[in-house]
Amino acid sequence: MRGLIWVVLLFAVAVVAATTFGRNDGLVSIFWAGWRTDVSLNFFVLTVLALCAAIVVATHALVRLVSLPQRAREWREHRKEQAAHAALREAIAELANARYGRARKAAQRALALQAHVPALAAAHDFAAIGHLLAANGAHRMQDRNGRQESLGRALAAARQGGSGRGLDDGAHLMAAQWALDDHDASQSLEALAALTPGAARRMQALRLRMYAARAAREPLQALHMARLLANHQAFSPTVAQGLLRALAEETLAQAHDLQQLRRLWQQFDAADRRDPRIASRAAKRAVDLGAADQARQWLRPFWDRLGELDRADREAIALTLAEATDGITSDWLPALESAAQAFGHDSAVLAAVGSSYAASGLYGKARLLLEQAAGAPTLPTRARRAAWRRLAQMARAQGDEARAASCDRTAATLD
């Protein structure tokens, strides 16, 4: 298309030239030092145009000749700039290939070249990236002093260049990860605290904060971070559920009295308090602290909707209730009877109902249920042993020492 346009323009110029100069009978007389020269107007015009073109070409040639040293200097700087960028790319490639020593040297070479390139002198982002790559290589080589030195220079360069590209946040995130690798949770939390509000809400920042809080033995804070990550679907549902339950268990294990346990429970997310496994673990901790009534209070909402729980959750609630029967009141009896009728095949439910009957003094009802639970091979050994011991207590209360001794021996033989 462009060639066609040029052809049309050429024809147009030819037509205009033929029309203008074809019948031009004008003359141009030139007088110089007593001499006279007559030339046609067409020749004069063409000569002037040619002379102008020659002057322009000569001027351009002279300018290029005069600027040759400057252009040579710019060419050398451009080559150095290309070499600096190539070294930076090489450092990234070597890091990806796990050649950390070479990556560190390549990053240092890029920074050395930057110092000799005026175009890169004010490129603070280039310096920050180079220092971060060098720090990463030093970290992988376990050179902590070199890593901290490069990290400090990277942060200084990022501050000079402003936070428009977020290089300072990136440096703090990398520093937090490195501190976790060094098992220094406090240093990691300090680096995360330096993040801007926007960067602190990113998934990677939340993930690092969760790991750091867990390493610092602050499982409640780690639990809150894990809940945020789970809400943002940072984990698969199965992984998220297992992680939340593990962190909740670690948090509850830190409670040393009932008041502290209640305070921790109130600080849990509502979704965590609705988890049967977490509620059963909280109830178990309350039992360990001698607060069986509080344990039953936390278990009661789940027991009332036992049919909505899956087998594993139902077993967790039932086995915890079996340990929290001390001082159980009569208002539990209707719910216990309904559960025994609905889940007569579930050994965990039978153990919980039987233990509750025994604690209420209903030995006749409790004995059959506890014997079925104690003989169930699917029930955990600890629960079966507790059932046999409960049977032994009932036998002693009824004055049957022989049967009590037999139940004790059976409980002792369970592995």
Image (cartoon, rainbow, N blue to C red):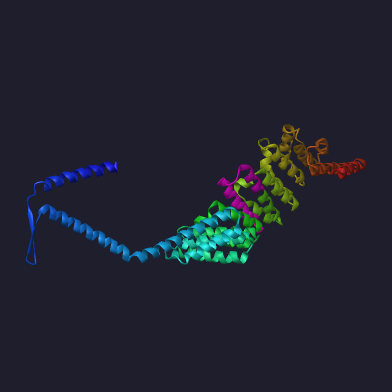
- Residue at 72% over, 32% down: 342
- The secondary structure making up most of the magenta span is helix
Residue at image position (80%, 44%) is 382
Point out residue 177 in the picture as x, y percentages from the top left corner: 60, 57
Residue 289 % position (x, y)? 74, 53
- Residue at x-position 66% and y-position 46%: 242
Quarter containing the C terminus = top right
Nearer the observer, 47 or 386 = 47
Residue 349 vs 37, above or below: the answer is above
Decide whether residue 232 is among the magenta residues: yes
- As displayed, is residue 238 above or below residue 221? above
Q: Which residues are magenta?
A: 216-245
- Residue 75 horizontal side relative to residue 222, left or right: left
Q: Nearer the viewer, residue 285 or 192?
A: 192
Point 53% across, 56% down: residue: 90
Could you say where residue 210 lies in the image, as x and y percent from the top left? 61, 54
As for residue 71 lying within the magenta part, the answer is no
Residue 354 location, x and y as percent? 79, 39
Check the image and name the residue furthest to the right: 402
The quarter in which the N terminus is drawn is top left
Q: Nearer the viewer, residue 44 or 304?
A: 44
* The quadrant where residue 30 appears: bottom left
What is the tally of numbered marks visible in this picture? Answer: 0
Q: Horizontally, is 175 left or right of 328 in the view?
A: left
Residue 131 visible in the current orientation: no
Q: Would residue 128 appear left or right of 243 to someone viewing this image?
A: left
- The reply to whether residue 352 is visible in this rendering is yes
